[in-house]
Image (spheres, grey):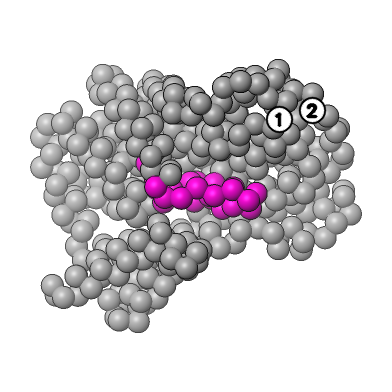
């Protein structure tokens, strides 16, 4: 039993290290799926349990499919270039103002379309804006990555991890705002201020403002309408406590087909350019976590939560901080799944659950593997010829995430 547990943890650790370090420059998905395959090959996880773990991510897969189709369709129709030219014009040759506009756009996109949408939809537009404005793209790209997590608990739909942690039983919107409105403001503001300070040398001075903005054609307008309609669909689905994956997927497919019909283009070319590897990556991560669950980790976590809960304030601070850092080890979606199952067993006070949500949403700003949104962001910038290594992101993440997490948790605890 001890040997089996050790082997399971060893394989999961090696797979996670592969996702982080990307040996041989292989994509993250390969290392996650290799780890899952090794668990099955050595009999450390039954096939039925692995298949059930893959099935737990169905709503996430559908959500990602819809968002990736929306993003690629919008890119093909020049929507990102149009948004970029608009942002560059409003910056009025000020790089700090362009940085502020990008961050504000990230807050809006994350709030109403989710942090994954900020990574997939907004990031290419921001890179295009930096190129048109002849500004250093990295500070603007970091703004996209960090705001995607910092603003991801403004609304229940702002992060798929919110749905995972609450196990599909979301609090009413009024209760949600009472718990998270002020902590969200704290996280967003502190993240902005710390990131601006870290990147101050790169965002000083002027940028190009005389940028020609070509008008959107019919296909571009249809793509923009599809994104707006998707945001409306997600708000309605969230209000009615409906899972977001299927509506998002339908909206993405419908927008793609409508735009292709208007532009008289084949949808096949769009699907070829979508980063489908993210789907096996997510599936592999869920399998790795399921293997850890089979070693009895959830029982230990639940017992730990139950013992802590005798002192709710201390429990909230400790558990939220632990999950924030732990999410960077296995990604926040599976980490949220573990926490959700432990919460169902331990029944901690609402204050503790809220702190866990802040931790699982905001904590991943520490590293590139912390959240699915950050991995999607990394794939998006690689398509544009940019790259950010693990240590480079960690240096920025450590300076921005820790104070933002402290501010958000302190604000939530102050609310009682």
> Residue at point 26% right, 19% down?
414
Distance CA(mark 1)–CA(mark 2)? 7 Å
Location of residue 6 in the rendering, given as x and y in whole percent from the top left corner = 19, 70
Secondary structure type for disc 1 = helix
Above or below, 178 relative to 83: above
> Residue at point 79% right, 24% down?
210
Q: Which residue is mark 2?
A: 211
Task: Report if the CB atoms under discs 1 and 2 are less than 8 Å apart.
Answer: yes
Q: Is residue 383 left or right of residue 413?
A: right
> Is residue 188 among what the camera can see?
no
Magenta run includes residue 336? no
Q: Nearer the viewer, residue 145 or 110?
A: 145
Secondary structure type for disc 2 = loop
Q: Is residue 175 left or right of residue 375?
A: left
Image quadrant in which you'd find residue 21: bottom left
Above or below, 372 relative to 92: below
Image quadrant in which you'd find residue 206: top right
Q: Quadrant of the C terminus?
A: top left
Q: Which residue is mark 1?
A: 133
Q: Which residues are magenta?
A: 366-391
Q: Quadrant of the N terminus?
A: bottom left
Q: Is residue 359 left or right of residue 255?
A: left
Label 2 crowd bin: few (<14), some (14–19), many (20+), radius 10 Å: some
Q: Nearer the viewer, residue 376 or 204?
A: 204
Above or below, 337 relative to 48: above
């Amino acid at each position: 039993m001890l040997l089996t547990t050790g082997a399971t943890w060893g394989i999961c650790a090696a797979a996670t290290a592969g996702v982080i370090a990307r040996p041989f420059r292989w994509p993250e998905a390969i290392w996650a799926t290799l780890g899952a395959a090794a668990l099955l090959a050595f009999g450390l996880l039954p096939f039925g349990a692995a298949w059930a773990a893959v099935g737990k991510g169905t709503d996430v897969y559908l959500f990602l499919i819809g968002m990736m189709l929306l993003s690629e369709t919008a890119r093909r129709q020049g929507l990102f270039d149009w948004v970029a030219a608009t942002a560059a014009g409003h910056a009025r040759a000020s790089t700090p103002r362009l940085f502020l506009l990008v961050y504000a756009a990230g807050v809006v996109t994350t709030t109403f379309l989710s942090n994954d949408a900020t990574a997939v939809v907004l990031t290419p537009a921001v890179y295009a804006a930096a190129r048109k404005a002849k500004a250093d793209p990295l500070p603007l790209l970091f703004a996209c990555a960090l705001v995607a997590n910092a603003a991801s608990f403004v609304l229940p739909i702002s992060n798929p991890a919110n749905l995972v942690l609450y196990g599909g039983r979301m609090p009413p919107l009024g209760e949600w705002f009472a718990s998270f409105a002020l902590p969200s403001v704290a996280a967003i503001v502190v993240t902005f201020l710390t990131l601006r300070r870290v990147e101050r040398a790169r965002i000083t001075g002027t940028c190009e403002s005389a940028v020609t903005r070509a008008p959107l054609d019919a296909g571009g307008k249809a793509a923009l309408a599809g994104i707006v309609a998707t945001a409306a669909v997600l708000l309605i689905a969230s209000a009615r406590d409906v899972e977001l994956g299927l509506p998002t997927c339908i909206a993405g497919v419908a927008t793609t087909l409508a735009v292709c019909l208007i532009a008289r283009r084949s949808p096949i070319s769009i699907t070829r350019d979508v980063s489908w590897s993210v789907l096996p990556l997510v599936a592999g991560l869920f399998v790795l976590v399921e293997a850890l669950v089979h070693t009895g980790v959830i029982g230990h976590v639940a017992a730990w939560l139950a013992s802590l809960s005798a002192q709710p304030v201390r429990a909230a601070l400790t558990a939220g901080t632990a999950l924030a850092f732990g999410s960077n080890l296995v990604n926040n979606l599976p980490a949220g799944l573990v926490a959700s199952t432990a919460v169902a067993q331990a029944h901690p006070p609402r204050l503790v659950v809220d702190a866990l949500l802040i931790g699982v949403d905001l904590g991943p700003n520490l590293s590139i593997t912390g959240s699915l949104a950050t991995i999607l962001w990394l794939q998006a910038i690689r398509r544009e010829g940019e790259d950010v290594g693990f240590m480079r992101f960690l240096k920025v993440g450590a300076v921005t995430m820790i104070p933002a997490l402290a501010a958000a948790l302190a604000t939530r605890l102050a609310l009682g």
